[in-house]
Image (tube, coloured by chain):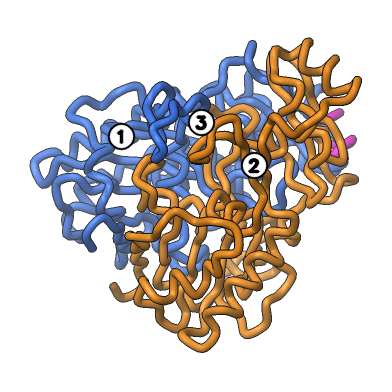
Chain colours: A blue, B orange
């Protein structure tokens, strides 16, 4: 499509286990082209990186036990959330919202039991999802010059529902900065900084159902945002604390 | 694309003026099919609905003057923002974040001067963007059974950059509710409510540049979310106040 976009689900991937080289696996199954953006869901990245934890193996500390009681959550889950977090933003009404060590603000630090086959087992977010994206990209470099996004769905203040965002990326202009450039009328745009990486993650999510085991999609038509260097990753999307009015 | 998505920019629209029937205009220029989602940017909807205001015609009141001084903003602009708002959430560090009368939380109640051709003139959001979406849809009903989204880009707490969201929609399942349904492993999903309308708005944004005067895109491949009825619109995305931890 001239000027348009295509989003193609990557189908037929097997269940992912620790040590799977995701880039190679996807590269063997998907037709990838220069300028594509490959969006991989957090869950499979976590599985490939061995980030599953059995609750039976977690010994909750005092804080986790108290928080768990207050929120009606399993204290072992709460302990994992605290381990993954550098700050608790809200702990009330059954909701635990933290900032992860990587700087993502979300519920339960992304610790999650959906689409994890083993019982009583949860997945943690990748330790460094930008590094995950760089690794997957490196495995695909011989096939195509593309960008990689690792995505996860997070809740939002004020709005119901979760939307997929980029928790990691490589080779993508995560933020498209229009400040200082002219709009269609020639007037200078003053406040336009577009979260391209998040919009790509959201777009890719639409091409797959949550139950259909489609953990990746290819977004075609965004070559203008694909860069030779890996770049700053999704870290560039972190709003500096000093500039955040909703802590 | 089987199982995939296509996003097609609608090009060649003239400058939109008050009274333009946007649905008819777009219908004459775009090839629309049953099951498509037409995403129209707020700016052209506001123009068609006569929601431009000349700052010279605004007489700021006391509160607007005081707020304007404190925030370094034009008091006439602040007055327009207050007129459009039912609550001020934050007014500090040069930033004014309010809840609009329609229930959208964003900076400056969406009052904005970019892509407005007349000098010293700003656009307000549509008075009721769900109603705008229904009107556009009605104008297109004879061409195709599609859904319509009115989109705008808003800033987010914690994350840098703006992402496009649905401020209005008609004929679309705005929230896809997976709670109670099984995941790929057969386990019940407990917290999965997907903000489809927002993800569609974000996806559509990627198919057009801010300066290229492409105010609409067609998203193809989401017929499963297109409904016969207009439905509850983007109002369904409003998080109830009692359930919002970030006021």
> Would residue A247 appear left or right of A208 to someone viewing this image?
right
The verdict on residue A68 being magenta is yes
Q: Residues within 10 Å of mark 2 (few under 14, many from 20)?
A: some
Q: Which percent across, then down, holds residue A178?
A: 40, 29
User: If the image is split into quadrants, where does the C terminus of chain A sit?
Assistant: top right
Badge 1: how crowded within 10 Å, few (<14), some, or many (20+)?
many
Work out how far the residue at label 3 is from the one at label 2, CA to CA, in angstroms: 37 Å
Asked if labels 1 and 2 share a chain, the reply is: yes
Q: Which residue is mark 2?
A: A55
**Looking at this view, is A59 or B110 the one in front?**
B110
> Residue at 40% of width from left, 21% of height from top?
A180
- Determine the chain carrying the residue at label 2: A
Q: Quadrant of residue A161?
A: bottom right
Q: Is residue B176 left or right of residue B38?
A: right
Q: Are marks 3 and 1 in contact (CB under 8 Å)?
A: no
- The reply to whether dot 3 and dot 2 touch (C-beta < 8 Å) is no
Per the rendered image, the range of residues in magenta is A66-71
The quarter of the image holding the N terminus of chain A is bottom left
The image position of residue A171, as x and y in percent, is: 26, 32
- Residue behind mark 3: B161
Residue at image x 86%, y 28%?
A66
Circles 3 and 1 on the same chain:
no
Name the secondary structure under disc 3. loop
The answer to whether the residue labelled 1 contacts the one labelled 2, judged by CB atoms less than 8 Å apart, is no
Which residue is the site of mark 1? A172
Residue at 66% in and 65% down: B132
- The disc placed on residue A22 is none
């Amino acid at each position: 499509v001239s000027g348009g976009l295509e989003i193609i689900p990557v189908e037929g991937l097997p269940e992912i286990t620790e040590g799977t080289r995701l880039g190679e696996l996807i590269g063997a199954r998907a037709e990838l082209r220069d300028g594509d953006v490959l969006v991989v869901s957090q869950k499979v990245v976590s599985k490939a990186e061995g980030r599953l934890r059995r609750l039976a193996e977690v010994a909750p500390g005092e804080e986790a036990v108290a928080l768990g009681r207050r929120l009606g959550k399993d204290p072992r889950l709460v302990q994992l959330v605290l381990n993954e977090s550098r700050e608790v933003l809200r702990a009330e009404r059954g909701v635990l919202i933290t900032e992860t060590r990587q700087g993502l603000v979300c519920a339960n630090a992304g610790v999650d039991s959906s689409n994890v086959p083993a019982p009583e087992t949860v997945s943690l977010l990748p330790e460094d999802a930008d590094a995950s994206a760089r690794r997957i990209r490196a495995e695909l470099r011989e096939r195509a010059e593309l960008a990689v996004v690792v995505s996860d769905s997070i809740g939002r203040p004020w709005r119901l529902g979760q939307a997929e965002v980029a928790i990691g990326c490589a080779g993508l202009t995560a933020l498209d900065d229009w400040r200082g450039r002219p709009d269609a009328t020639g007037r200078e745009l003053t406040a336009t900084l577009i979260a391209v990486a998040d919009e790509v993650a959201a777009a890719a999510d639409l091409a797959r159902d949550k139950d259909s085991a489609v953990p990746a999609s290819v977004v075609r038509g965004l070559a203008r945002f694909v860069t030779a260097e890996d770049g700053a990753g999704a870290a560039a999307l972190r709003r500096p604390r000093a500039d955040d009015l909703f802590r």
